[in-house]
Image (cartoon, rainbow, N blue to C red):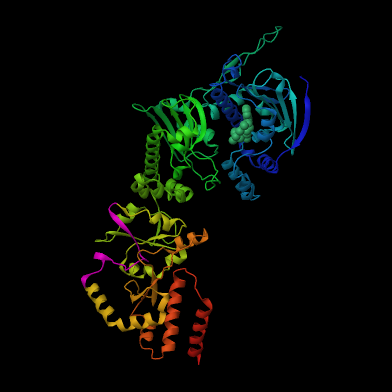
Amino acid sequence: MSVETQKETLGFQTEVKQLLHLMIHSLYSNKEIFLRELISNASDAVDKLRFEALSKPEWLEGGAELKIRVSFDKDAKTVTIEDNGIGMSREDAITHLGTIAKSGTADFMKNLTGDQKKDSHLIGQFGVGFYSAFIVADQVEVFTRRAGLDASEGVHWASKGEGEFEIATVDKAERGTRIVLHLKDAEDEFADGWRLRNIVKKYSDHIALPIELPKEQAAAEGEEAPAQEWEVVNRASALWTRPRTEIKDEEYQEFYKHIGHDYENPLSWSHNKVEGKLEYSSLLYVPARAPFDLYQREAPKGLKLYVQRVFVMDQAESFLPLYLRFIKGVVDSNDLSLNVSREILQKDPIIDSMKSALTKRVLDMLEKLAKNEPEQYKGFWKNFGQVMKEGPAEDFANKEKIAGLLRFASTQGDDGEQVVSLAEYLARAKEGQDKIYYLTGETYAQVKNSPHLEVFRKKGIEVLLLTDRIDEWLMSYLNEFDGKSFVDVARGDLDLGNLDSEEEKKEAEEVAKSKEGLVERIKASLGDAVSEVRVSHRLTDSPAILAIGEQDLGMQMRQILEASGQKVPDSKPIFEFNPAHPLIEKLDGEQSEERFGDLSHILFDQAALAAGDSLKDPAAYVRRLNKLLVELSV
Ligand code: ADP
Ligand code: MG
């Protein structure tokens, strides 16, 4: 035992304490994953060393083979995981093993409910990492030394997982990290060669460096125990370099969990090798669930980049567009240089062509998922639909392909679930229908009951109902799909084209003519509040409706701009009325100009309310309405 100096006791960050508590109490059903996490860290540490050693070969300290060793002591009830990777300095150990540096940790903690079942699921999404050691151990010791530091700058870190840890400086001859788990009494089954071997095979077969366990050997009677021999128990080759046909689904899944820091299996993956002008392999995964920080700016995005099997960087975001930021995976290039940096990646034309190829692969993979596993795709859409909707604006070249992947709620459903594809919509469109109709709004209830849908309901025409905040913006980028243009049913002078018969058109014209007087009267009464007044052919049941001008901003866009403090150009709605409605007939026959004014204003305000808009002068509306109510009751 070497001498300890500069010993101190430090407290864990609050979040770590919470996480530890939670983990110990909620991950009891899958305890063995601690080994996967620790091996995963060891493998990351070796990757980092390999990369750093490209420019600092002396860090290899003579160049022993890079590997991970897992051993155990049945009597002492310990399991030890050792690597000769990059190691940690004292500072490293304090920050990396005492805090959680992940972005959004606080958010994550806020999401915890206290309900163990739900929380253990959340924890799965968060990735438990090093602290999972405390699922099986009541004391954890870490001996580590950072590559490039002197043997006297080793570190001994120890904790019982109860709020604090001890740290001291010790001698450590070998670079790298050794983690000793002092198993809880009830967990001593893990101090067993057979058990450990099975766990390694199960979770870590894909790790690209040798994982060794002690060879089982019995000392012969009366002889001294022979020197320890080791044997490699995993396959130890980078998964993505092997031929697709030789890789089992479980292997793909375990590899995903390793690189994706996820506990759940992915929904789908796509593994490819490209040869020719550019040479690279890619393995891309669609996760089953959105990470809790999908919408945070600083959240991790991008793929792991390898150059000729050497790990170069995490989160190489230049390989996929932002709207595909949830995709996990690796890219291994033969063309890039090993000392490539983020800045170079951003400019390199090789990357551009890789990016478009990888983007296409992901979109193809999603298409396939949608086609072959519609139920799974539903889940995908629930989790990632909002992000996919950023696609058409960001990725012009793939607009049509992305549009094909979008899913919407529509008047054909009754629960607002986003399940209708554009292809499906067109497949059941009415004869002669050459447009895709949609309506945007604040909530599903609001659009579902919107008067704008009356004529569509009457004619049995499906309308897509868009209520995500991003929808109006999305639609401003989608002009057409499959040659059919999109039409906002609340906008402009609704032209149903062939869907209206000649008779209907003629009749509408006649009605419009006969109501010219009323139009003028309303115009005079509403004055500046409207840009136009006209007879509607959208309505069957409601008396009046507000339409948006062809070029004007819709309500969602207006609200978004206003919320971001921008000046929104003034636009006035078009007031359309339903000449067949009894209230309009009453209005038409109204002799008192005062009463005419009140009623037309009430109709105007009601139309605004039905569209989900707020009233400019709600008190005036209430006053007018009450006046009428009083008259009614006398
Ligand atoms: P993650 O692996 O997601 O970063 P972990 O909780 O698993 O989170 O590990 C926290 C950090 O501790 C790692 O990022 C790394 O910096 C450090 N670490 C853990 N294990 C090792 C190791 N074997 N060698 C070097 N550093 C390690
Ligand atoms: Mg880890």
Q: Residue at x 33, y 83 (%)?
A: 518
Residue 135's image quarter?
top right
Q: Is residue 41 above or below residue 560?
A: above
Residue 365, image x and y in percent? 39, 40
Residue 520, image x and y in percent? 34, 82
Q: Give the quadrant of the N terminus.
A: top right
Image quarter where ligand 1 lies: top right
Q: Is residue 225 above or below residue 386?
A: above
Q: Nearer the viewer, residue 628 or 263?
A: 628
Does residue 11 appear in this view? yes
Q: Is residue 573 above or below residue 286?
A: below
Is 488 displayed left or right of 73 in the figure? Answer: left
Q: Nearer the viewer, residue 491 or 374?
A: 491
Q: Is residue 486 magenta?
A: yes
Residue 210, image x and y in percent? 55, 21
Q: Nearer the viewer, residue 249 or 599?
A: 599
Q: Residue furthest top?
A: 223
Residue 262, image x and y in percent? 54, 38
Is 23 displayed left or right of 242 in the figure? Answer: right
The magenta region covers 482-502
Q: Residue furthest bottom?
A: 634
Q: Residue at x 42, y 47 (%)?
A: 377
Q: Is residue 284 magenta?
A: no
Q: Nearer the viewer, residue 361 or 116?
A: 361
